[in-house]
């Protein structure tokens, strides 16, 4: 199903601007918070707040039953995604702690591009040299 325009573009623009403002001030706020809390504790508080808020939201919308429908494999994927997201948050907070908020923000925004660039060679080898280990595939990729 495609998105249907609601005609509420002003609300969408306002929400996008608020999101950008929050995102822009986050590294500075986290840098100040790290003078009081360590990265693990700060991440725990962020996830605890998000879990309580989402739980109350889902209860209010009567949508909590969606978790009862998950299969064991889906629970494992959910757990893996949660652990990796926590690792991402802690890594970002360590970056904010040991460098400037501007540097940390720049690197976190460049992460998808850097991951794509770094994965280009292994992906190319995987697609063009099936059945052979990566070092044995000699190519002119780089």
Image (spheres, rainbow, N blue to C red):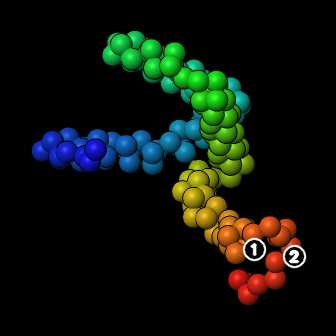
Q: Please identify the quadrant where the N terminus is shown.
A: top left
Whether residue 42 is visible: no
Rendered position, 10 above or below 71: below
In-front residue for pair 117/26: 117
The residue that appears at 15% across and 42% down in the rendered structure is 6
Q: Please identify the quadrant where the C terminus is shown.
A: bottom right
**Residue 59 pos. (x, y %):** 40, 12
The residue that appears at 51% across and 15% down in the rendered structure is 68
Q: Residues within 10 Å of mark 2 (few under 14, many from 20)?
A: few
Say which element carries label 2: helix
The residue that appears at 45% across and 20% down in the rendered structure is 66
Q: Residues within 10 Å of mark 1 (few under 14, many from 20)?
A: some
Rendered position, 87 above or below 58: below
In-front residue for pair 34/130: 130
Query: Which mark is on residue 129?
Result: 1
Q: Mark 1 and mark 2 in contact (Cβ < 8 Å)?
A: yes
In-front residue for pair 100/9: 9
Say which element carries label 1: loop
**Residue 82 pos. (x, y %):** 63, 32
The residue that appears at 57% across and 58% down in the rendered structure is 112
**Residue 18 pos. (x, y %):** 33, 42
Per the image, the residue denoted by label 2 is: 136
Apparent side of residue 22 relative to residue 113 in the rendered image (left or right): left
Quarter of the image where one finds residue 127 = bottom right
């Amino acid at each position: 199903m495609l998105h249907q325009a609601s005609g509420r573009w002003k609300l969408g623009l306002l929400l996008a601007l608020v999101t950008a403002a929050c995102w822009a001030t986050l590294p500075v706020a986290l840098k100040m918070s790290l003078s009081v809390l360590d990265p693990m504790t700060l991440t725990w508080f962020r996830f605890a707040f998000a879990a309580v808020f989402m739980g109350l939201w889902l209860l209010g919308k009567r949508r909590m039953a969606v978790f009862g429908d998950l299969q064991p494999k889906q629970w494992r994927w959910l757990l893996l995604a949660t652990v990796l997201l926590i690792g991402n948050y802690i890594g970002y907070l360590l970056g904010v702690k040991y460098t400037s908020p501007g540097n940390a923000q720049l690197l976190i925004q460049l992460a998808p591009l850097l991951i794509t660039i770094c994965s280009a060679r292994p992906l190319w080898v995987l697609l063009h040299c099936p059945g052979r280990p990566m070092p044995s595939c000699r190519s002119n990729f780089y």
